[in-house]
Amino acid sequence: MELETQTLPASSEMSSESNRRHTVRILIGTAVLLVVVTIAGVFAAIRYYAPATELWSALTLPSELRQAHFITRGTDVSVYAVTASHGYVSESTGQGRYVVYAAPKEDALFVTADPVTSTYHLELNGKVVLTSLEPITTAALSPNKKQVVYAKQREGIEASRDAADWDVILFFPATSKNIVVSPGFAPFFIDDTHVARFTNAGIYVIDTVTSTQTELLKQEFKQMLPGFSQSPDHTLIAWSDPVTKSTLVYRTGSSLTRVMAFDGFVPLFALGNSALYRMKLTPEGTTIYRYSFTSTDSARMIHTLPVSLQISALSL
């Protein structure tokens, strides 16, 4: 009977195979470590490196905010147009001034102030069209783009929030002509010939052709409102009252129709065509909440802008 014989591999062959397996394990481990370090580095950059944080914030912006203007209030004006591919790009030419009020983005209208000269400016399409020694709070552009209405504190008055100390003025950029409409604050256009404004007794609209006046809302405003906004399509207005601790949205026209109301004073917000956007300043940055007009859901947090941008206002 013949026995089958087997030849054992040489010890050198076994050692070579073991070395190959060891090398493969080292390469896999190194690759995994590199991936982990890379991911950790990316997250660290997003968290601590300002340009990376800003780019990541721009890339993750909700689509409804990607064409908005983001504004920081400070010694320098910085108006940021945000796109998903280019991040934050400064569009401001008003160095040394800060934004007091931003009208809807498409109007390209801003109220700015110069802390050095103590002057206020109306800026339209990137150009200063009016300069005032008295404070200007808000401004609005007419639908035909030919008129601006703004609220200016009367000469000789010092830091008053009483509506009786402020005038609503109609301004024509083409001729630099100013016409005093009436006392009031937070003016806005219903159409090209009807200007509405807030007063101590309520909201009134005046026909600029016939000078006739109509009451839109009877309500006592004990002081000027620090929070006011108009929607991009000019059909909605919103304000927040620190006295009554309420925030209200109305549809405009021959009368005012309430669209939304909620308890609480909101100092920083912007009005869209279908939602109100509230900004809350936190140590992490500016958190934006969305209040939908078509939903009964509570406010929804939709984005946080990095603290490095110091964003405190929004123009839709």
Image: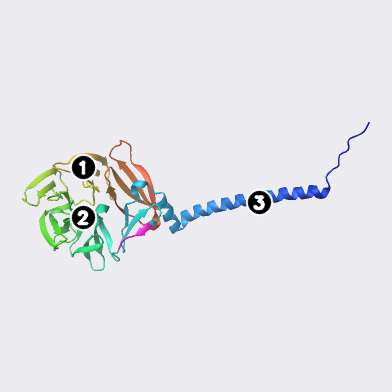
In this view, the mark in front (3 or 2): 3
Question: Where's residue 66, x and y in %?
Answer: 35, 50
Mark-to-mark CA distance, 3 and 2: 64 Å
Question: Where's residue 65, x and y in %?
Answer: 34, 49
Does the magenta stretch mainly form a helix, a strand or a loop? Answer: strand
Q: Residue furthest top?
A: 1
Q: Which residue is mark 1?
A: 250
In this view, the mark in front (1 or 3): 3
Camera-side residue: 20 or 204? 20
Which residue: 37% across, 57% down?
A: 88
Task: For mark 2, give the secondary structure.
Answer: strand
Q: Which residues are magenta?
A: 88-92
Camera-side residue: 6 or 79? 6
Q: Amino acid at mark 2?
A: Thr
Task: For mark 3, give the secondary structure.
Answer: helix
Q: Which residue is mark 2?
A: 138
Kindly identify which numbered label has been placed on residue 27. Answer: 3
- Which mark is first along the chain, 2 or 3? 3
